[in-house]
Image: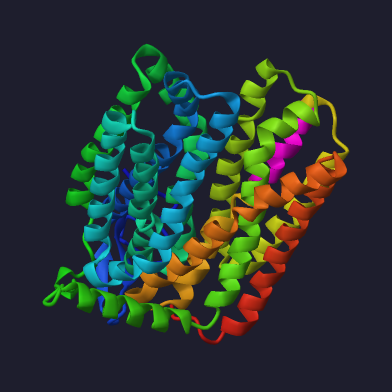
Amino acid sequence: MKLFFIISNSIKKDDKGDVKSLSISVESGDSRQLSPRRATKIALTLFLATLVGYIARANVSVALPFVANEYGWSSEQLGELGGVLLGIFLVGYGISNVLISPLIDYFGPRKSLIFTVLAWSILTFLTGFLGTFVMIFILARFFLGLSQGTLFPSASKVVGTWFPPSGRARVNALYLSSGFLSNLLVPLLLLPLIVATSWQFMFYAVGAAGLILLIPLWKCLCDYPDETRSQTASHTSMRSLIKLTKENLNEAIRLKGLFTITLSFLAINLAWWGLSLWLPTYFIVAKGFSVEELVWGASLPYIGGLCGMYAGSWISDRTGKRVETAFSFAMIDAIFLLLLIVTFPHDLVIFVTGAIFFFLGVMAPTSFTLLQSIAPPRLIGSATGIMNGIANGGAVFGPILLGLAVALTSSYDIGLIIMAVFQIIGALLLFVFFRTTREYKYH
């Protein structure tokens, strides 16, 4: 099986035109032949890891009504404690991204992925077993965030180390698309499972899926294309690990362009989280959707996001014009956000919202790919952790700002305008990044 989105200008062919190998370069300058079959296995393994990770973090959203019913929570308690359960994850997630991800560059992405999947699988299983205790439930969500904070930096490290620049956007898009896909799968898979069994059993099942995932992670991944380059820790005391973390963070922070791409990704995430978390309420309150219409109306835009992520990344890799592609998508996206204000027929609302998610989809893989172009492979884990942690941590203000706009104006219009402004800011910052790094890019 061939994975066409990975195949690029680095392909070697035989006399018959058949693909023989894919050449990539590593930091030392050595060349390593990566066959399309091996490339496919690595890319799909990263996709499965992030997909199960998303399901493990999102499962509480569908379990909350059942948890509240078992605990006997009132509506006020559901709002308060439910918000804590959903939000405490992001606290641990942000801390882990920034402070633990530098260790990926020390231990390697394969070991890091195996550890993080094992950790979140055990925590998810224990949530089902001990989740009847509220404080333990909350602590489990915090530690789940800590365990998952290294997931995307590890995946980014694999892509930056193994794949050539001409194929990275599409590989990044593949594993990042698990976010859109999980929004479709979580209610379809987990709700029927809870109804048929219990919310506790659902946590057991998701935890078991993570444990099964350890098999392809162990078999398909290596830390580096040349395993002899894998770093082996000779001193793993806590003091030495803290020192190493500080050193990697200090070096990564000084990377030219890191601050700019982080701010751009933050602006895009403010728009993404603001729009996606308010979408169901917006459809009902502002556009008059019924509950039956909401079932499909709130799902179809994510299909648009998947298509946009793949299409935009394909264009980015084929043309090499990553900044120009992302800038165009972001500006068109801002226009569709403004069009949504004056759109009322429900079918047209779904179309416009799908277009918004379509043009928004390319921004995440582009940000990861651009970051991988300025960071040496030995610092990709640290740099990705900084960007992803700050951007996702700061993005909590997206839904807050949109909600504040609704509270002050009794309308979603100003909130959508703010989301469009975030898109424009993110796009403009990409050009600032391009100007400051065009002569500095690592590879």
How is this picture coloured? rainbow
The residue at the point 45 percent across, 37 percent down is 58
Q: Which residues are magenta?
A: 347-357
The residue at the point 45 percent across, 43 percent down is 178
Magenta segment, principal secondary structure?
Answer: helix
Q: Decide if residue 380 is on the left or right side of residue 257.
A: left
What percent of the width, then of the height, locates residue 217? 23, 49
Above-or-below relation of 313 to 29 = above
**Residue 309 covered by magenta stretch:** no
What percent of the width, then of the height, locates residue 24? 33, 69
Q: Quadrant of the N terminus?
A: top left
Most foreground residue, 297 or 5: 297
Q: Quadrant of the C terminus?
A: bottom left
Using the rendered view, name the quadrant where residue 55 is placed.
top left
What percent of the width, then of the height, locates residue 332? 76, 53
Residue 350 shows in the view:
no
Residue 292 shows in the view:
yes
What percent of the width, then of the height, locates residue 279? 68, 36
Above-or-below relation of 166 to 409 = below
Most foreground residue, 214 or 400: 400
Q: Decide if residue 30 is on the left or right side of residue 90.
A: left
Most foreground residue, 442 or 157: 157
Q: Residue furthest top?
A: 196
